[in-house]
Image: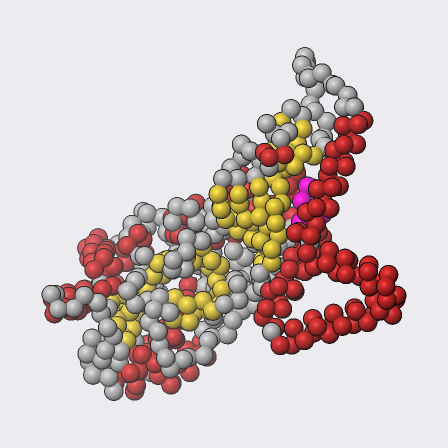
Amino acid sequence: MLRDKGAGATQVQPTAPVPAHAIRFATPVVETPGILILGRWVYRAVRALVLAPFRFPVVVSTLVGSVPTLYYLGWVGLALGVALSGAGLGAWWWRWPLSFRSLVVLRALAAWRWLWVYRRHWQPVLVVAGLAESYQERQYLPQIRKVTCTEWADRVRVRLVAGTSPADVENRVVELVHGFAAPSCRVTVLGPRDVVLEFPRRDLLAEPLDALAVSDEVDLCALPMGLREDGQEWRMRLHGTHVLTVGVTGAGKGSVIWSAIRALLPAVVDGTARVWAIDPKRMELSYGRSLFARYADSAESAVGLLEAAVEGMRERAARYAGRQRTHVATVTDPFVVVVLDEVAFLTAYHPDRDIRRRAENAIATLTSQGRSVGFCVLAALQDPRKEVMNLRNLFPDKVALRLDEASQVDMVLGEDARDRGANAHLIDPDVPGAAFVRLEGSPIPVRVRAAYVTDDDIATMTADYGAPGLRSVPGAEVT
Ligand SMILES: Nc1ncnc2c1ncn2[C@@H]1O[C@H](COP(=O)(O)OP(=O)(O)OP(=O)(O)O)[C@@H](O)[C@H]1O
């Protein structure tokens, strides 16, 4: 079956000797007649010629146009034709740069990358990576079907060898990343034996991002947080959801929390949003204390704050019952974000059992009932294991910063996240703030990097938007 071209495998010559056996049963060697080999070469050449105009339309049409030009008009005519074509391409680029980029530049780049990177290195990289399959002493490789380029990545569509599964490729992404000198690799399954390997050409997230400018227009469903790996802005929803940010110490949880608070500031000042902060470490949030309507840094006050949020949520739910099904942020009913740094301090590490129980109850109630009445919990956590945080499934949205172990990726982002390329455990420690998230409406995790809000930025934020602004808002209380 594997000899059949339709099986989708490229056959390669064995490169290593077969290990010795005591008794070896070998299939008899039958010499192929020369005429058959010749026939096959001719067939391949004819097929390549017939398919060439479809596979390389620009190259073929250029060649086909050049030959009669050279024949009838000579070298001067050909040079004139080349100059005119160049001018036409220049005019296209000048007048319609976007279509020129997608139809000419990216296609030419894809052809070059196919030839120079993937076609050239495919066999050695895949064999060494362990993706070559052996059958009857022959090796078979997954086959490149097509290479396309987007602005930021190469997408290599691959037909797998019959009998293998996408998981075999997913387990070798590290080898592929190094083999093709790419910053990362994501595997997307399109269908049976049909997968796409996405290799970014350069890492747009390698450099730290300065804190983003504060926009007067606050969209609570799309707060600007940083950059996505495809170069677009990373926006995060807070209204109507709860967000759990998980990462080892130093992974950059603070930058996610502060980027969200920063994006909310105009709404905080006009009174349509409030931030209630719980800061058990007294290091992360205390610096911007005057931005918060409520602040707690001890276990007792933190639980009190959470229970007050539950109370506020219930009061709102009782008022809305039978009258209103969704929350609209107003000065009388502001959107409340409960920022909870190191949530495990309250739910797992605190020695007082009663504190742990009360905190867990309050967080569970807020996360299960709060979103439709305008309460959101934005929590940070270092260790996502169930023993530490058994409420993580109550957070619909999660941000996976650098994690300790591969198994934690699926705990945070959901079952198939690692299979889909969310290698949060492989995030470089020198790139804090980098994370994987699932964007709304897409099952594929996306790599992002949060903007870094420095201490100076926080000082400026408190000076510009701090307590005086809050005090002008009815009901704001700085404790
Ligand atoms: N988005 C970012 N871009 C660049 N550097 C960052 C970013 N986020 C954090 N850093 C750097 O990493 C350091 C650690 O970040 P941060 O304190 O936010 O980590 P953390 O996950 O909150 O750690 P911990 O749990 O120990 O508080 C910061 O002092 C800063 O130098």
What percent of the width, then of the height, locates residue 249? 44, 59
Query: Does 70 sit left or right of 249 as displayed?
Result: right
What percent of the width, then of the height, locates residue 359? 23, 58
Q: Main secondary structure of the magenta part?
A: helix
The outermost residue toward the top is 23
What percent of the width, then of the height, locates residue 471? 25, 85
Q: Nearer the viewer, residue 327 or 74?
A: 74
- Residue shown at 60% from the left, 74% from the top: 96
Q: Is residue 273 magenta?
A: no
- 198 relative to 137, above or below: below
Rendered-image quadrant of the N terminus: top right
The answer to whether one can see residue 366 in this image is: yes
Q: Within the image, what quadrant is residue 357 found in?
A: bottom left
Query: Does 12 sit left or right of 73 as displayed?
Result: left
- Residue shown at 45% from the left, 79% from the top: 213
Tell me how the rendering is colored: secondary structure
What percent of the width, then of the height, locates residue 390? 29, 50
Q: Nearer the viewer, residue 84 or 387?
A: 84
Rendered-image quadrant of the C terminus: bottom left
Query: Does 317 sit left or right of 144 as displayed?
Result: left
Q: Which stretch is magenta?
A: 118-123
How many numbered marks, from 0 up?
Answer: 0
- 109 relative to 82, above or below: above
- Residue shown at 74% from the left, 69% from the top: 85
Q: Nearer the viewer, residue 51 or 187?
A: 51
The answer to whether one can see residue 340 in this image is: no
- Residue shown at 60% from the left, 55% from the top: 148
